[in-house]
Image: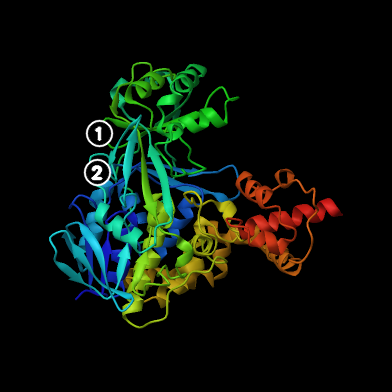
Amino acid sequence: MYDVVVIGAGHAGCEAAAAAARASAKVALLSFRPTDAGQMSCNPSIGGVGKGHLVREVDVFDGLMARAADAAALHRRILNRSKGPAVWGPRVQADRFHYRAAIEALLAELPIERLYAEAFALRLRGGQVFGVELADGSLLPSRSIVLATGTFLGARIHIGLESKPAGRSGEQASIKLAAQIRELGLAPTRLKTGTPPRLDGRTIDWATLQEQPSDVEPWTFSAHPDSVLRLPQLRCAITRTSTETHDIIRDAEAMSPLYSGAIAGRGPRYCPSIEDKVRRFGDRDGHQIFLEPEGLADHLVYPNGISTSMPVDVQQAFVRSIPGLHRAEIARPGYAVEYEFLDPRRLGTDLQHRELPGLFLAGQINGTTGYEEAAAQGLVAGLNAARYVQGKEPQTFDRRSSYIGVMVDDLTLQGVSEPYRMMTARAEYRLLLRADNAVSRLGAAALASDAVSSRRRKAIQDHLERRENPAFADTEEGQADALYAPYVERQRREWDAVDRARSARLPNDLDFRALPGLSAEMAERLEAARPETLDQASRVPGVTPAALTALHVGFARAAA
């Protein structure tokens, strides 16, 4: 009998299994193949604005992702350097092989049993889970289960008008389990994501392109004492689509599964396909593309910015219309993948299903997109599956002290209508939630979780003690604390004002799109709902507390 069985060895599943094992649970990690753990299905990159914050927070709890990213980093860059440190986004381009090897090595340090088979069904008894039925009919008995199936649940991939069951190119989908999930009434609809074609880097004209070098100053994602940079650093390059590119895509629009009706699921708003970009932003003469190497011993290059599900011949044609790519060869075509997800509003903040005790969910099955969002949910689900079995109180995350808390709160309260991506704009306390102060914010909670190693425990304790020393004011982190202190206090006052003004009526003719600080997504949701008060606005699906603050400030200024 296991304490925790984790289904799926992607980023969510690996973090869930590791967290549960660190919490002293007896854990099994179930996946199709031994090579599944640490796979980077899309871009081999970790971090970015908002996403990098999540990685640092997972690291405080002794998670895997930050250490693996450091071990595999071949290009490092702090995004948003021209802005304040609250919105800096640490990001690394990783070597696929080294990243997967690092994850395997970290998993091997923990008492996790690795199993390779297909999960056919959840076994239920008395309204709660008690195991997993495998394809051969055998049972894995378990007191709790973490579902971390990624894009594999009932999945289909699309290239042009061709479609077939698969959760990733060349790999099977989870069909039987998806059927049971539907029968239980848990899967409301489908979502989709996509990936660009991979290019043979030897056929790219690098000399004609703008270079993007790695950061000169050394920095690591992880605060673990053993985390180091090991690999030589490479340069990336930047190019743009052309009007010819857009013409080729427009002419072939009828062959896109996005517009033929073949794909019903909605894709991520903030990472659209190149077909979507051309249709939605037809007035632009070009869209930026980052050419990012996938490995030191690999010629593949990831063209970040041209995710597509067009037919292969169309992909080849539009790729060669892009400056620097006139001779480029496609080594593997891009595709879209459509998959089933479960409504996260049926989960508690511990990511346990409210109607099926012992069942926890993490990653894209909850409607999110991205490795970092998946890893953070894996940490929450794994810790809490172990605590559920051990009869302990749940480990919860507050949105006022972590981006993990922001994400879990958004998902479980608001749900999703499209793949959820973490952004700093989602946090009303974003000036406090910096990437550089994750240990200060979450160190005490990590120590209380009893799920960190002795070395990590000492490193956290040392950091928290240093904060009490007057000399801490002269570090990066201490200076940023001082810089933001008055603004953090102002944010708190603004949020208190929002609470007091919830009954205030909004003007009937209020133009939400014209309010400063309100994102296009939030304005679109509010325009559609036309709430009459701030209280009603707070209940519009998808509207975040950060958006409520901007709404309150905006209409208050207009009324003044």
Tell me the quarter of the image containing the C terminus: bottom right
Closer to the camera, 467 or 208? 208
Say which label, 2 or 1, has the lower sequence index: 2
Three-letter amino acid code at disc 1?
Asp
Find residue 542 and report its horizontal and vertical position in percent: 57, 55
Compared with 107, 292 (above or below) is: above
| Residue at 52% over, 43% down | 269
Three-letter amino acid code at disc 2?
Phe
Find residue 286 and report its horizontal and vertical position in percent: 53, 24
Compared with 23, 170 (above or below) is: above
Crowd tier of the residue under label 2, counting other residues whose Cα lies within 10 Å: few below 14, some 14–19, many 20 or above: some
Closer to the camera, 296 or 243? 243
Find residue 438 and report its horizontal and vertical position in percent: 48, 62
Compared with 82, 342 (above or below) is: below
Tell me the quarter of the image containing the N terminus: bottom left
On the image, numbered disc 1 is attached to which residue? 298
Left or right of 208 on screen, residue 175: left
Find residue 103 and report its horizontal and vertical position in percent: 26, 54
**Residue 380, quarter of picture:** bottom left
Query: Is there any visible trace of residue 110 in the rendered image?
Result: no
Query: Is there any visible trace of residue 193 in the rendered image?
Result: yes
**Residue 17, quarter of picture:** bottom left
| Residue that protrudes farthest toward the bottom in the picture | 391
Q: Are marks 2 and 1 in contact (CB under 8 Å)?
A: yes
